[in-house]
């Protein structure tokens, strides 16, 4: 006999979370309410935009809560009125207080985009790519008062593909996370999931990234810069300056080439293949560029419209090139 369905409150914000919500809505349990971050003004036009989770919830005619504060008696009582058996959290963006962690009988579980205890924090997928990991994954944890420190319920892993970006890996892990979430909930209901404490000595952090983190230091190894460009794609994006103008960089490729006597940041070639730049070790071919105020394009197309001289140097704004 199948266990009875659970009443679930879902808390999430980003695209990564929306996949989990859609899996729950299609599953055997009952999502009774959805909690997400308030709408924010985004983009150049500062248009107020709902979160991906809100879009998915409203498409399914679900009640949506968007509190500015979650550490209040009023909000806890509001969630209690839905009588949840379980709270599921995925990329919500806030640490839950004890008043919520202790509210449902099954507690709160979190879908985290890394193989914990590695990459705890706000940007685990980006840091997985930034760090050049060969393997990625998701971990479902029983939440506690810490940041991603709870006992592990289930993990799943995949290989990081060549040329993987944070964006492409997010899509893969969102799907993997939703599948693993459904397995975990089934195991919780059947009593077959055994919590495993994390080894806190093995923990690493994945702090939130900022726009300034995208500035490329050409003195570093080409392989390290390659990972950085891919790990910051699509946000906040890697960038450099050419003749004082900002260029966002995409689709890098390491070129093994002797550059020891060439200043880092020197343009070695600028043609239809892209922009080849000397690094602290080896060189990097940039195949896509986005100039200020324009769309992302093939580097060859950009270079046909504007010349970057071989021998010039890329670097920080205001530096000679």
Image (cartoon, rainbow, N blue to C red):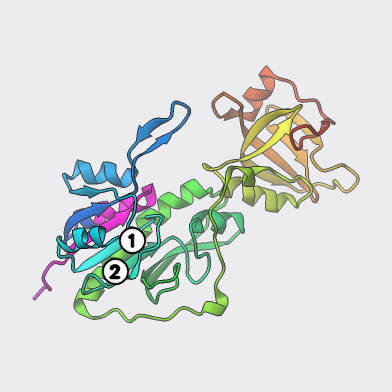
What x and y, as percent, mark residue 152?
Answer: 39, 75
Against 293, is 84 above or below? Answer: below
Q: Secondary structure at mark 2?
A: helix
Residue at 30% over, 60% down: 72
Q: Residue furthest front?
A: 73
Residue hosting label 1: 71
Q: Is residue 128 above or below residue 194?
A: above
- Taking 313 as reference, is 152 above or below it? below
Quarter of the picture containing the C terminus is top right
Whether residue 137 sits left or right of residue 111 in the image: it is right
Q: What quarter of the picture does the N terminus occupy? A: bottom left
Of the pair 129 and 61, the residue shown nearer to us = 61
Residue 267 falls in image quadrant: top right
In the image, is residue 11 part of the stretch drawn in magenta?
A: yes
Residue on which the image places disc 2 = 99
**Outermost residue to the top:** 305
State the image coordinates of residue 186 (x, y, percent, origin top left): 22, 71
Image: magenta residue range:
1-23
Distance from the alpha carbon under mark 1 to that under mark 2: 8 Å
Do the numbered discs 1 and 2 sit on residues whose CB atoms are within 8 Å?
A: yes
Q: Choose between 276 and 200: the one closer to the eye.
A: 200
Q: Is residue 79 above or below residue 300?
A: below
For marks 1 and 2, the one nearer the N-term is 1
- The label shown at residue 90 is none
Which one is nearer the viewer's eye here, 306 or 146?
146
Q: Residue at x 33, y 61 (%)?
A: 71
Residue 248: image location, x then y, percent: 62, 35
Give the side of residue 315 with respect to residue 75, left or right: right
* Residue 107 appears left or right of 240: left
Give me the residue at 33% from left, 44% from top.
Answer: 38
Q: Residues within 10 Å of mark 1 (few under 14, many from 20)?
A: some
Tell how many labels: 2
């Amino acid at each position: 006999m199948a266990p009875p369905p659970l009443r679930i409150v879902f808390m999430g914000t980003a695209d990564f979370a929306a996949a989990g919500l859609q899996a729950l809505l299609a599953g055997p349990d009952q999502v009774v309410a959805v909690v997400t971050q308030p709408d924010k003004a985004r983009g150049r036009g500062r248009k107020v935009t709902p979160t991906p989770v809100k879009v998915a919830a409203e498409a399914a005619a679900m009640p949506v809560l968007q509190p500015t504060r979650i550490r209040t008696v009023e909000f806890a009582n509001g969630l209690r009125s839905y009588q949840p058996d379980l709270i599921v959290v995925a990329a919500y963006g806030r640490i839950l207080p004890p008043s919520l962690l202790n509210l449902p009988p099954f507690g709160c579980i979190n879908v985290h985009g890394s193989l914990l205890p590695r990459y705890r924090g706000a940007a685990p997928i980006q840091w997985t790519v930034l760090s050049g990991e060969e393997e990625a994954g998701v971990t479902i944890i029983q939440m506690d008062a810490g940041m991603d420190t709870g006992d592990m319920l289930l993990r799943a892993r995949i290989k990081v593909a060549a040329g993987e970006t944070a964006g492409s890996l997010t899509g893969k892990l969102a799907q993997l996370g939703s599948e693993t979430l459904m397995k975990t909930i089934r195991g919780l209901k059947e009593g077959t999931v055994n919590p495993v404490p994390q080894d806190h000595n093995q923990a690493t952090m994945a702090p939130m990234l900022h726009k300034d983190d995208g500035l490329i230091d050409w003195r570093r190894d080409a392989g390290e810069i390659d990972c950085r460009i891919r790990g910051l794609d699509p946000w906040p994006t890697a960038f450099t300056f050419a003749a004082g103008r900002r260029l966002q960089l995409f689709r890098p490729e390491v070129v093994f080439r002797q550059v020891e006597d060439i200043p880092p940041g020197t343009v070695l070639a600028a043609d239809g293949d892209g922009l080849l730049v000397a690094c602290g070790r080896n060189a990097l071919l940039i195949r896509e560029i986005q100039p200020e105020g324009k769309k992302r394009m093939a580097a060859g197309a950009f270079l046909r419209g504007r010349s970057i001289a071989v021998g010039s140097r890329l670097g920080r704004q205001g530096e000679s090139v």
